[in-house]
Amino acid sequence: MKLKKSSGYLSYRIWALEIVSGIILLCLAFWISMHADISNAAQRLSSTVNYVKEQCNNNQKMELASETKSLMRIMESAEYINRNLASDMEKSGFEEPDQTLLENYAKESYVTGILLLSPQGAVEQEYHTDERNVWDLYENIDAEALLDVWNFPEKTYASRVNCEDGSYIDLAAVGRTDRSGILVAYYHTSKEYCRIFVNSMEQLLTGYSVKHDGTIVISNGEEIVASNDSRLVGVNMDDNEILRTIRRRAGGSKLVHVRDGGDTRGRSFGLMEQSRNYYIYAYMPERGVFNKTPQNMLFVALTYLLVLIIINMVRWQTEKKYQKQKLQIQQEYAQRLENKNLQLEESVKRETKANSAKTDFLARMTHDIRTPLNGIIGLLKMEEIHPDDLELLHANREKMLVSADHLLSLINDMLQMSKLENDEIVLTQDAMDLNALLMDVVTIVEQRAADAGITLEYDKASDKILYPYVYGSPLHVRQIFLNIYGNCIKYNRIGGKVITHLDYLGTTDEMVHYRWVISDTGIGMSENFLEHIYEPFVQEHSDARSVYHGIGLGMAIVKRLIDEMNGTIQVTSQEGKGSTFVVVLPFKIAEKEKVVQPEAATGEASIRGLHLLLAEDNELNAEIAARLLNDEGATVQVVRDGQQAIDAFASRPQGTYDAILMDIMMPKIDGYTATRVIRSTNRQDAKTIPIIAMTAHVFDEDVKQCLEAGMNAHLPKPLQMEKVVSTIARLCKRKK
């Protein structure tokens, strides 16, 4: 019931939110649309006014040019009449021309009238076609300018006189050459002709619609001379409230909002631009400006209603579906609870089993580690009891080496598995000879197989290795096959066989694919165990640790490494008949020149006479290494950490040490840092002296780190003196 009430309350809130959102949306749409309409109106009116202004300016320029041309023409007429008058007076002998002669001069020169003035400016004689024009001329003529024509004969005078009726008179004055005085010729342009400019503007404005383009007005400042609204032509500017307000408030092309005659319902938007002699106005009523706002508001409202309808339909359908699903969820909830309880019980069982497996593993590992240690300790105690039995001492030492090797193998497998599980394994991409690597593996395995009484059959056909030079991690490839062969030999019978067949699968995108099929005739595995073969610490037989010396990590390591290489492995087996391992690995093809070939042996290696610096923090390890190296004829100086190694190298003369043996994990400064510091020392032998890592860090990524730090080689602990001696001898020979 509460849920239902809550749902109803939520529905009311949603409806209220939709209504409020609609109101806000409409207000926002109204504001945006209104400003858009105002902006569009301003753009339209501004464009119209600027165009009309440009036309007015063009016509005024034409009018000015016409005025200049007209004044030049009347001046030419005045000079023509003056020349003819002088000539005719000389021929006739008369002092003044008669009226007929002046009339002829006027007709020939196409002038309206001629005035003959005394030097003082008094009218002596005249001819005109319109009496009224003469009086306009008398009232507006510049007497001083006329007298200058007499006083300075080189001067001429020309001017336009505007009449009260809207017409104008163009006149020119020159000094008479026949006698003292001034000759004035003038031409009257009628009012009707003067309206040509205004008529052209009116014709231009007739192309604009008052309804769509607004009202356009051209004014001379006092009255309206042209408009697309014929009712306004001739109206005084003071009689039009809108135009007065626009002229008072407009700044540049700024759009202004004005009232019409104080009526708040009659509002308009307008602007004004000034040309040379005219004012151009354009205004539009509000209903014409906001013509799109109602449409936009209606569109927004309908769209919002449509969206609301769709949203509410979807919400209704969703609610209906939700209620249906809710019932289904409630029905499934009990089932899920029951399933979770069952899963919890299963999880408890698995955890219990896992804890048991861990406890079992720890117990077995304790046993596996203690077994070789117990053997070594027991053999040492036997040597204490029988110190003079040389045969027994020799046999015991062989057994201790076997136990130590087994213990080292256990530790290496544990460390390798730990790194794989923590994604700390770094696969290198070194150029290598795959054929040579496989032959090395076969050589190692052949000896193990021979010791166990097993026959190893390997298809050595070289044509199967079409692309022997590839990029990969040699250490890990070798480990994969050594582990597989180790299982095939370990779980085989005396007189059994291990058979290997290699297939070339082809190339794709510079990658070559090979398949190895390795079969044995050993004890085999059950189908149940095959499902868990890649799980760590899993062994099918309870006596595998004691009989076969295994801890169940070999195949787990193989699987992880193959997965890291993007390869595959499949295992089939039959109890009592043997097992078959199918491995497919891809390699990127490399050039032969990229492969680093091992240096050929040039005889028995020797370090006799070499002076070595050994950095080792473990006192026992340092003592053992120094003693073994001394036995080989080398002189050894021991330091306890990386800082002492740096100080010893820096404090001795150049060439004191032939090589440096560097442990990795040391106090103060580790072997990596110490190597970098020595390499950066400003002396000639700092870059060339061999620095060899001698450490318990034995994995491929550890070797890579050593080389990146500036070391020349890597020797794993426990030390194999043959390899130690050969490596030091090789590097010291190369240095020389």
Image (tube, grey):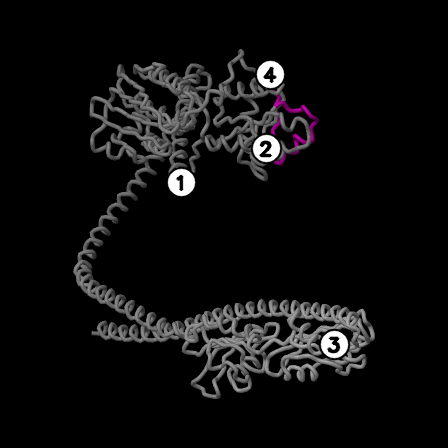
How far from the left and from the top, in percent, is residue 70? Answer: 65, 69
Above or below, 355 against 623 in this view is: below
Observer-nearest of 48 and 148: 148
Verify CB contact (< 8 Å) between mark 1 and mark 3.
no
Indicate whether residue 3 is drawn in magenta: no
Q: Of all residues shown, which one is farthest toward the top?
A: 603
Please tell me which residue is depicted at 24% across the width and 47% down the height of the picture. 349
- Real-space CA distance between mark 2 and mark 1, rounded to the nearest whole angstrom: 28 Å
Nearer the camera: disc 2 or disc 4 = 2
Select label 3 or label 2 by which is in front: 3
Residue 131 placement, left or right of 26: right
Q: Secondary structure at mark 2?
A: helix
The quadrant where residue 247 appears:
bottom right
Residue underneath mark 3: 97
**Residue type for callout 3:** Pro
Q: Residue at x 43, y 27 (%)?
A: 471
Alpha carbon distance from label 1 to label 3: 132 Å
Which labelled disc corresponds to residue 608? 4
